[in-house]
Amino acid sequence: MATYVWDFTQGDKDHKDLLGGKGANLAEMTRLGLPVPPGFTITTEACRAYMRTGAVPRELAVEVTTALRLMEDRLGRRFGDPDDPLLVSVRSGAKFSMPGMMETVLDVGLNDVTVHGLARFSGDERFAWDSYRRLCQMFGRTVLGIDGALFADALDAAKAARGVTSDVDLDAAALRELVGQFQEIVRAHTGRPFPQDPREQLDLAIVAVLGSWNTERARLYRRKERIPDDLGTAVNVVPMVFGNLGPTSGTGVAFTRDPATGKTGNYGDYLANAQGEDVVAGIRNTLSLDDLAERDPAAYADLRRAMRQLETHYRDLCDIEFTIERGKLWMLQTRVGKRTAPAAFRIATQLVDEHLITLDEALARVTGAQLSQLLFPQFAVDADRTLLARGMAASPGAAVGAAVFDSAAAQERAARGEDVVLVRRETNPDDLGGMIAAVGVLTARGGKTSHAAVVARGMGRTCVVGAEAVDIDAVARSFRVDGHVVREGDTVAIDGSTGEVFLGSVPVEPSPVSRYLDEGLDSALAQAPDDDTRELVSAVDRLLTHADQVRRLHVHANADTADDAARARRLGAQGVGLCRTEHQFLGERRVLVERVVLAADDDARQSALDALLPLQRADFTALLEAMDGLPTTIRLLDPPLHEFLPDLTELSVRVALAHERGQDVPDDERLLAAVQRMHEANPMLGLRGVRLGLVVPGLFALQIRAICEAVVERRAAGGDPHAEIMVPLVGSVQELRLVKDEARAIMAEVGAARGVELDLPVGVMIELPRAALTADRIAEEAAFFSFGTNDLTQTTWGFSRDDVEGAFFAQYTDNGVLTVSPFETIDARGVGRLVDIAVAEGRATNPSLSIGVCGEHGGDPESIRFFHGAGLDYVSCSPFRVPVARLEAGRAAVEDATVDAR
Ligand code: PEP
Ligand code: MG
């Protein structure tokens, strides 16, 4: 088989890498015996060679000749024949659909001679000259790089001269004259006449389409869609068929099922006497396929047969582009059609019920991202609403609240129980408090990887970014948009799934699918408003249940409180993978920690620790009760010390002001000295995690004791607690040994005092490259590993998430250093390699070592597949992402099985 050119009879749908999506599916339809014009595909390999060397490979011309001759023989027409010319289209088509981003040239092969042949063949002189006019214009702009405005201006002038406003009102003579003018433009700008040799036209068009892989907009689109830059496009050379040869011709699009609901039937649009783009351009009103059945029953019957054949063959919803040329059906494109999230679930289970696919295949066809779209609350569809502006849909959901313009106001109002929407030009790490307090975040600037977008997604907070029409006056605490002024406290509503911003309140309701997850199938079905919703909820239930049956990864939740844990459990969590205990030390209890840290002597410290013990024990008892019977991993205190101490600047100002007034403030002075002593330039890399536990006496011991006592209490109450102790930020096995020795001693002491046996597992978080690289040694002491991929990402890249996301991630995505934030999706090459090393070496030491992940990546679909492949035992994620993780873990398992079976 040739390297660069494949005839449509040679390829198939599994060659998308080489033939692009369009080419592969045209080949597949040809194999199925469907009426596809007999064309050929120039492979992506040619494009890659072109990108490497700046020239097409020398063999290409020869291979094109062979394929072209075959095409001519099949059709009995010749390229460049003056009487009955063959014309071709030259179409781009990459592996992944990039709609409208690359170039296409139609009617290649027309020249001053063949235009007459086309007029004779079509019996329509106007049509022939219009086609030639279009070729000159498209070729001039796309292939020869001439400014398109020159052609457009000439066209406008021609219309003005004849007193008409529409292209279709130009007659053959006018179009012929226009062709002359267009050719003049070409001569003036290239110094050469418009190419008359059809083969030269074809070769130039091929190069132009190959080159269009790298246009600015194509690159931008790839970056946005995370399509690699080095794939290249294929080029399809297809004989032209004409849908605009009178009333028995036409062109249309069709779906084998409704892409919005999944219902089977005749979905599509048809336009008689029209060519390709006219259907989507909305120039004239289209007809339904039923109308086509009346106009041309024979062609319609052929189309229906082809649709059924395609759906049976692809075993999925297909979308189709077709043309009817004088009553003869031609299939110009097909592909497995895009669909909405609800339709994806419905179609997958419908196909199972029709015995077209297995449940495994159905599971592979829905995604975690689609499921999460179905989980967010939604604005009631039939509500009255006033649209104010549109931005980018950054983090889904529907949020209604009072507009506030800074973090402090957000927190203040939220503390009073008010729902607020934080409105900022853009956000930065200082806004975090406000973002947490708000039900939604709206920014006027920034894209999908802006600070606001990334952070909001991470928290599951509804967010709309880049609503440029929103003109914010932060000082006046208001924004202006389109004549409306919205002041602080006025109600706004934002839809993070559509990017819409509304004035006033719009009623919100939980989605039917989240109701199903929260309350169970029966309750959700009983409350569903219609059959479609019932079908959707059942479809989600079936696929999620199947995912649970096939997945190998367990799904745990990151939950700090009993309420969170209970919620996670309802959503299907099989344990708590991370309880961050620092949250239990903030608020009112912060002063107790302050006393521990600043204690003048052991007694003072002990009395502060004693005050904390019952509080911590109560936290853990409640958590273990909510997770009764399931593993509950409690992490010892992690954050930098300064988070528990007063703010250095505030304190310095307070002391300085007192001194100025001539006052002595000994307590504040002592505090200030301590805060200054502990101040760190890089707290993320400072005295935190296990280091803090080893340096501040009694702190970890208090927590371990509280855990042990909570376990004893739960057992006494008839419960089945499974607490596990997790040590953060370990870099050396010796750190773990020290904590473990302390833990053992406390377990023995508490056990002896209560007359019970306590042997709680003590494990580590792998959050530092050194921990991953010395995993063999750490595994000698650790009962389990849990990858803290948030910190592991920070420490592997050497950047702090809080600092860099707002500062330069947007630029790094623009210039291609990053395709996606490594805090969102695991950086498989770098951080992932450390994970692989630690898994292999940890298990070499201890084959039964339990290994999980509890960083944010544990809930990210792409990362979950990575962790499945890496052989982890579980992923742990925020409660609201648990269902998504269950689904994705199931998909990873069935896809793995498919690969194994090949
Ligand atoms: C982590 O680092 O991945 C982790 C879970 O810990 P935290 O996010 O609390 O630092
Ligand atoms: Mg961490």
Image (tube, helix red, strand yellow):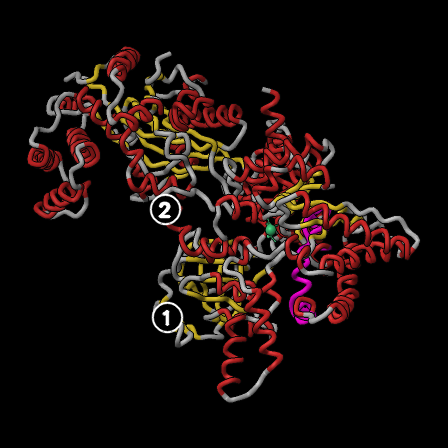
Q: Nearer the viewer, residue 739 or 792?
A: 739
The residue that appears at 46% across and 56% down in the rendered structure is: 803
Residue named by callout 2: 814
Q: Earlier in the sequence, mark 2 or mark 1?
A: 1
Is any part of residue 891 visible from this angle?
A: no
**Membership of 607 in magenta stretch:** no
Residue farthest to the front, as pictured: 601
Vertical side of 516 occupied by 82: above or below: above
Q: Nearer the viewer, residue 599 or 875?
A: 599
Other-residue count near label 2 (Cα within 10 Å), few / some / many at <14 / 14–19 / ≥20: some
The residue that appears at 40% across and 15% down in the rendered structure is: 10
Q: Secondary structure at mark 1?
A: strand
Q: Nearer the viewer, mark 2 or mark 1?
A: 2
Residue named by callout 1: 480
**Quadrant of the rendering where the C terminus is positioned:** top right
* Residue 849 in the image, given as x and y percentages of width and height: 72, 36
Residue farthest to the bottom, as pictured: 662
Q: Secondary structure at mark 2?
A: helix
Marker count (numbered):
2
Residues drawn in magenta: 566-595
Q: Main secondary structure of the magenta part?
A: helix
* Residue 434 in the image, given as x and y percentages of width and height: 52, 66
